[in-house]
């Protein structure tokens, strides 16, 4: 990928060198990286045997689509497939970043299955089509995640990173406890990558990283510990200033500012719980999981987090 991006850059510089123009090198680097990602990322799964590739691609598309619907309980249907796909991704260096991303989300399927078992199916109406399942409440999801994580040990990778990440978050005036967002997003694996293109410890999307001042070429700063932490902290601080509390800020971190802002506009109360069921299934899972993780690791709820003073 880097070689092809470099080739494009060199070719462009050669052409522009024959003209009397001002060259914005930073803009050129971003253009080269954009070209490389658009044209080369589709080939990552080609390292898999063809029979495995078909199953993996089918699952990843299903999962990505399901994460964007509103029904949390539907994720339960992908539980067995996810556990089958994970070792396939793990067996090849090229797809291991996807494996890291998926591994940190296996418990989404497990929690969805447990919630489905606790949620009675809707009563059928004679002569009418089956009614859709009703999402569990935010309080039910919050309780389930607390139970799920109550005995979970911290990832081994966190031991070498948490102290460094906390100092970065504090310097950016963001509560240091939120560094555990990296456990939820990537399992503290800096190489993690989602099929949608998010990358690094804190799973920043390319456009978000660019907006935060992170360079993506000749090396992608999203995959560097310090740079990704600075970017994530700045983004969280911006979102908190906009939405006023951490659950909403985290919802916007996951689903997008526009999505959260639009739902709040039509809501009678300005809270995560008020809009949760209208958010994508991933976000409905993500926010209570982050809260349960912070509570497990730091013994503090999101409501009690305070911005560090200068």
Image (cartoon, rainbow, N blue to C red):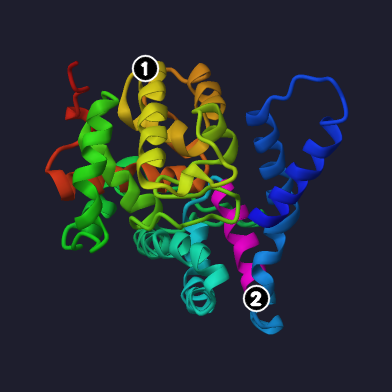
What residue lies at 51% left-to-right and 80% top-to-bottom? 91
Span colored in magenta = 55-69
Label 2 sits on residue = 47
Task: Mark 2: give few (<14), some (14-19) or many (20+) Cα within 10 Å.
Answer: some
Query: Could you say which is closer to the camera, residue 74 or residue 214?
Result: 214
Q: Relative to residue 150, is residue 304 depicted above or below?
A: above
Left or right of residue 249: residue 198: right
Residue closest to the eye, 91 or 29: 29
Circle number at residue 241: 1
Q: Report the quarter where the C terminus lies.
A: top left
85 vs 72, nearest the viewer: 85
Main structural element of the magenta stretch: helix, strand or loop? helix
Q: CA distance from mark 2 to mark 1?
A: 44 Å
How far from the left and from the top, in percent, is residue 195?
Answer: 59, 56
Asked whether, in this view, residue 221 is left or right of residue 307, the answer is: right
Query: What residue lies at 49% left-to-right and 47% top-to-bottom?
Result: 281
Q: Which element carries disc 1, helix, strand or loop?
A: helix
Q: Residue 261, position in %: x, y? A: 51, 22
Q: Residue at x 52, y 25 (%)?
A: 263
- How dense is the environment of label 1, judged by Cα within 10 Å: few (below 14), some, or many (20 and up)? few
Q: Position of residue 137 (x, y in %)?
A: 37, 43
Q: Is residue 56 magenta?
A: yes
Q: Say whether disc 2 or disc 1 marks the residue closer to the N-terminus.
A: 2
The residue drawn where x is 54% and y is 45% is 70
């Amino acid at each position: 990928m880097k070689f092809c991006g470099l080739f494009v850059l060199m070719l462009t510089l050669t052409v522009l060198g024959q003209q009397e123009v001002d060259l914005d090198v930073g803009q050129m680097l971003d253009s080269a990286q954009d070209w490389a990602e658009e044209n080369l990322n589709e080939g990552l799964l080609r390292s898999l045997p063809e029979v495995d590739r078909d199953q993996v691609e089918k699952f990843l598309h299903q999962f990505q689509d399901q994460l964007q619907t509103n029904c949390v309980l539907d994720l339960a249907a992908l539980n067995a497939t996810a556990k089958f796909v994970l070792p396939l991704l793990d067996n090849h260096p090229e797809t291991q970043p996807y494996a890291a991303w998926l591994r940190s989300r296996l418990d989404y399927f497990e929690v969805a299955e447990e919630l489905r078992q606790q949620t009675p199916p809707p009563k059928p109406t004679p002569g009418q089509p089956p009614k859709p399942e009703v999402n569990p409440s935010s309080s039910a999801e919050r309780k389930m995640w607390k139970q799920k994580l109550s005995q979970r040990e911290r990832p081994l990778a966190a031991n070498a990173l948490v102290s460094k990440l906390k100092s970065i978050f504090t310097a950016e005036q963001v509560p240091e406890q939120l560094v555990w967002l990296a456990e939820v997003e990537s399992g503290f694996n800096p190489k993690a990558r989602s099929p949608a293109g998010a990358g690094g410890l804190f799973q920043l999307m390319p456009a978000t990283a660019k907006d935060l001042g992170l360079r993506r070429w000749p090396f992608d700063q999203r995959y560097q510990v310090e740079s990704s932490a600075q970017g994530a902290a700045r983004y969280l601080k911006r979102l908190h200033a906009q939405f006023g509390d951490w659950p909403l800020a985290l919802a916007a971190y996951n689903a997008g500012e526009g999505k959260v802002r639009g739902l709040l506009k039509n809501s009678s109360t300005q809270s995560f719980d008020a809009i949760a069921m209208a958010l994508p299934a991933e976000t409905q899972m993500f926010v209570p999981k982050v809260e349960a993780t912070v509570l497990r690791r730091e013994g503090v709820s999101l409501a009690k987090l305070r911005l560090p003073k200068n």
